[in-house]
Amino acid sequence: MGSGQKGTYDVAAISCGRDHTLALLESGKAMGWGGNGSGRLPADIPELCSVAAAPTQPVEVSMQQKLRSIAAGHGISLGLTERNEVAIWGLRRRRWWPARVGAAAMPQRVAALPLAMEVTAGEFHFAAIDEPVSSTHGA
């Protein structure tokens, strides 16, 4: 928990991916650190593999809305907004993002999931519980 000192955060939740970690703060913001591959934050420079010396300082994820949950997977990160929209960033896989995006450093809204209740990320897929049924998306 944060104490108001520089470099401390009030963490509400944490999620570990293959090469990176996400922390959801009490404020609804998200921080990420680790492998620095699959779309660097905030530089928007796609690098499709992890760097040799991963940074240990967290970087704030640039979101317009507050998040209520997070999920870190293999090369992707997910956030569930207060409006129940799913945001995804990292390595582009299949149909979730515009074709021009190779790696998304900035979160992109998943239009196919407008009313999600929960998200989770795995090695090569992610899943969401939405209304009225659940959805699973593969890599």
Image (cartoon, rainbow, N blue to C red):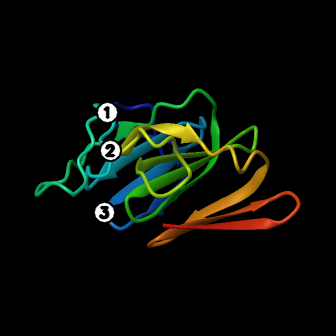
Q: Report how far apart the C-alphas of labels 2 and 1 lie in the structure.
A: 6 Å
| Pointer 2 residue | 39
The residue at 79%/48% (across/down) is 115
In the image: residue 7, left or right of residue 53: right
Foreground disc of the pair 3, 2: 2
The residue at 43%/42% (across/down) is 31
| Pointer 1 residue | 44
> Where does residue 32 sit, x and y in percent of width and height?
39, 46
> Where does residue 11 sit, x and y in percent of width and height?
51, 48
Q: Are marks 1 and 3 in contact (CB under 8 Å)?
A: no
> Where does residue 45 sit, x and y in percent of width and height?
26, 36
Label 2 crowd (10 A; few <14 / some 14-19 / many >=20): many
**Mark 1 is on which residue type?**
Asp
| Pointer 3 residue | 19
In the image: residue 56, left or right of residue 90: left
Q: Report how far apart the C-alphas of labels 3 and 2 lie in the structure.
A: 12 Å
